Every structure is written in structure tokens, then in C-alpha cells.
Image (cartoon, helix red, strand yellow):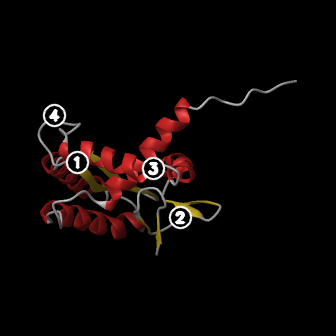
Amino acid sequence: MAKCSSCGSTILLGGKTVGNLRFCNDKCMREGQFLALAKNVPEEAVLQRVSEVFNGNCPLCGGRGPVDVHKSYKVWSAVFLTSWSTNPVISCRSCARKKQIGNLFFSGVFGWWGFPWGLLLTPVQVTRNLVACVSEPSTGKPSELLQSFARRSLAAEASMHSVPPVIRH
């Protein structure tokens, strides 16, 4: 199965393709515009940003870290329409669990009502949230996904500070 070039989520169906990059949705495709720039960000800058985020306070609750990227999963359906998503959030583990539990209940209530995808994807997304809630981070160090987010964030900041070319007529 394909992986999103932006958030690393598995793409079950659909997705967006730009050149040789594949994205799970429009949001990831927009964020993916910085992937090429991100390759040029110095490794020292990435490591410094990752350390600041990982060892800093949670951006959601202000509590102590470690702060990392955590995913929650959501699905909702209405008759023949089903929408599902993976939602990465940079937060402490406690805030991540709250999001995962919230999306677990949301999906459990609103996911079933579509045919056929709601019936098929609701157990998948509910299970993914359950696993994410009970699993602990495998190491005491920042994830690769946090490094990827930091790299793209630095690339986005650099592109905002660059001067656009002057167009002469």
C-alpha cells in the first residue's frame, strides 16, 4: 500500500498524486509543497528544532513533554458518503490520548452510517485509535515523523523569508 509523502499515513483508497509524490488528502498535498525545500534544510537546524519541540511544553495544554507527533483516526458516514482521515497532532501523550479517545467515540457513533465503506472502515479506525491509546512510544527519543515535521516547518519558514523575484515588463 502507498504511504503519504507528507504525513506517512497508509493510503487505503484514493489519494492525490503530484509527480512521483503521493498524498492522502489536499491538506497533505499543500504541506507537501515544502518537501523539495526541506531537503536543503541543514541537519543541525532540524535537530535543534526537534530538541526544542520534544523537550518543550505541549502546545495544546502547556504541560511538560515529551512532545511528539501522535496520530488519531476518524471516520464518519451518511448513506453512500464516507469520509475517513488520519490526524497527526504535535502534543504530549496525555493530549494525544484525549484526541484518540474522542475520535474513537466519534467514529463509533458516526462511522457506521454509510454503505459499504462506513461498515468496513469504522472497525478499522476504531481499532487504530484503540491501539494508539494503549501503545507507548517505543523509545524515549523523538520520532522520525517529528523530524519530518520539523524539517518541513523550517523549510516553510525559510520560504516565507525569501524575497520573491522581481518581474520586469
Q: Earlier in the sequence, mark 3 or mark 4?
A: 3
Q: Which amino acid does the dot numbered 1 rest on?
A: Phe
Q: Residue at x 88, y 24 (%)?
A: 169
- Residue at far right of view: 169
Of the numbered discs 2 and 1, the one sitting upstream in the chain is 2
| Mark 2, residue position | 14
Q: Position of residue 10 (x, y in %)?
A: 41, 67
Task: Tell which of 82 and 17 is nearer to you.
Answer: 17
Q: Residues within 10 Å of mark 2 (few under 14, many from 20)?
A: few
Provide residue 46's location: percent of width, then percent of height: 37, 49
The label number, if any, that marks residue 62 in the structure image:
4
Q: Nearer the viewer, mark 3 or mark 4?
A: 3
Q: Mark 3, mark 1: which one is toward the viewer?
A: 3
User: Which one is nearer the viewer's eye here, 48 or 138?
Assistant: 48
Q: Residue at x 53, y 46 (%)?
A: 30
Q: Residue 1: x, y in percent? A: 46, 75
Q: Which residue is mark 1?
A: 54
Examine the rendered structure and indicate whether residue 94 appears above or below residue 104: above
For label 3, the SS is: loop
Identify the disc placed on residue 81. Answer: none
Closest to the observer, 11 or 89 = 89
- Specify the amino acid type for callout 2: Gly
Relative to 101, 45 lies left or right: right
Residue at 30% from the left image edge and 48% from the top image edge: 50
Q: Mark 4 against mark 1, which lies toward the viewer? A: 1
Rendered image: mark on residue 42: 3
Q: Earlier in the sequence, mark 4 or mark 1?
A: 1
Which mark is in front, 3 or 2?
A: 3
Query: Marks 3 and 4, Cα distance to the nearest angstrom?
Result: 29 Å
How far apart are the two marked residues, 3 and 2, measured between alpha carbons?
Answer: 34 Å
Q: Quick check: 62 above or below 119? A: above
